[in-house]
Amino acid sequence: MSSLESDIRAFRYADGEFRDEEIYPERISGARHFFTDKVYGKVPKESPHLEKELLEEGPIFDSTTGNEIGYRKQFAVTLSRAGKSIKVIVLLNTPAKEGNFPVLVSPNIYGNHSVTSDPNVLSRTVHSISPRYEIAFREEHRGSKKDRFDVNEIISRGYAAVTYSYDDIVPDTHPKPSDIGGYGLYPELLEAHQRPGAIAMWAWSMSHIAHAIQDEPMIDAARMAVMGFSRLGKSVHVALAHEHPFKAGIAVASGKAGATPLKSGAGEPSALMAYLFSHWYRPGFLNLIAQVRKIPYGQKHLLAMSDVPVLVSVDETDWWSAPELQEKTVASANKIRMRRGQVPTLEFKTHRVGGHTVSRDWDSYIEFLNRSLYPERNL
C-alpha cells in the first residue's frame, strides 16, 4: 500500500469530501499534516537570527504634483542560521503625516523598483521562471508592476506598505545547489530529504520580514496584514495556516493549490502546473498529482486553517484561477469553520481588469483591511 493510500484509509475519506467534523475533530489536524508532508513541505519553525541595517531613507514625492506624499526607508535584513545567511532588501513606505500606521506586507516578483516609480528605490537584477532568465534592471522597469502592489495608493489610505523581492528568499527555479538561498538556513530539512517547496519558504519569509520592521516607530505592530498575488497568493494561504503575526490576509489570483481545488479540471491543469513548477512544492508532488482524484483533502481545508480574516480576490475573467470554484472553496471553508464552532472569516470578491490580474479598486482591499484590523469599529 502506498503512503498516499495509507493516508486515505486512515482518514476514511471518499473523493476528498470532509465529513462529520464534529465526530472527527482531529481531521483538521490531519489536513495540516497532509499539506505539510505531501504538498508544500514544512514551513521551518525555528526562527533565524535577524539583523537590520538602514540603507537609505527620505521623503516620497508625487511625480505629477511634486507634493510630499510619504516617507521611505530601505533596509538590508539579514537572516542567519546554521552558519549561513541571506540578505533581503526591504522597502518600507509610510504616509507623510505622523502616526502609528497599520501595515500591509507583500513580497514582489520583479524587485522593489517594479512596484513604485520612486527614483530613489534601489534597483536590482531579478530571476524569474516566467520568463526563465535573469532580468537586468532598466529604467523602464521602474513602476512597471505597481498595479500589483501600489505603494502610493496604500500609503494614501493611511497604511504603511512593506515589500521585498521573493527572489531574495529562494529563487523561483529548481534549487541548484539544493542549499541555495533560504534553504541553506535549514540543513536538517535537506539532510532528512524534507526540503520545503518554494511556496512554503516564501510563506516563511512573510512572518520574518514582518518581525523585522515591527519595531519601526511609524508601525502599529498589532495591526499587520499580508498580501500576495498568484504564486505568492498561494504562499499567503500557507503562511496563515501556520504561526504568524498577521491579523488579516489578501490572496489574489492564487489559482490551483491556492483557493482553486487541485482535483478540478477547470483552471490551470494540475499536472502541467506540477511539472513546470515542481520546485514550488514538496519533492514528490508530481507523483501526488498523478493520483489527484485520490487526494483526501481539498483547498477548503487549507483555507479553513486560517485563524484571521482572509479576502480571496480574483478577476472574473481569470480562467487560470477559475473564480467560480474559488467562491465555492471560500463558502466550504466557512462551513467547516462554523461546524467546528469557529467564526467564518473568509470573504470572496471578484474584479474585472482582465485575466490574471490584481484589482485596481484599492478601496475594496482597504475596506476589507479596515474591517479586519479594526473590528471594534464594526460594533
Image (cartoon, grey):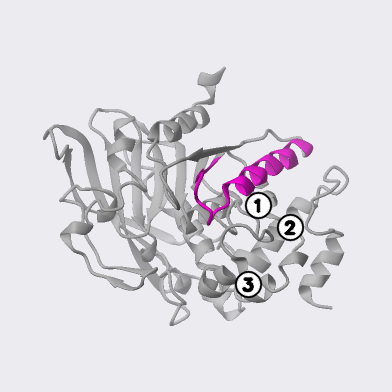
Nearest the viewer among 148 and 161 is: 148
Residue at 33%, 30% in the rendered image: 158
| Residue 330, image x, y percentages | 64, 42
| Residue 345, image x, y percentages | 62, 36
**Marks 2 and 1: CB-CB under 8 Å?**
yes
Rendered position, 243 above or below 154: below
Nearest the viewer among 251 and 33 is: 251
Rendered position, 230 above or below 307: below
| Residue 274, image x, y percentages | 58, 71
Find out whether residue 144 is within the magenta segment: no
> What is the spatial separation of the Cα atoms under label 1 and label 3, in whole angstroms?
16 Å
Element at label 2? loop
Residue 297 shows which numbered tag? 2
**Marks 1 and 3: CB-CB under 8 Å?**
no
Q: Quadrant of residue 290?
A: bottom right
Identify the mark nearer the N-term, 3 or 2. Answer: 3
> What is the spatial separation of the Cα atoms under label 2 and label 1, in whole angstroms?
9 Å
The residues colored magenta run 311-339
Residue at the disc numbered 3: 285
Identify the mark nearer the N-term, 2 or 1. Answer: 2
Q: Amino acid at mark 1?
A: Leu
Identify the mark nearer the N-term, 1 or 3. Answer: 3
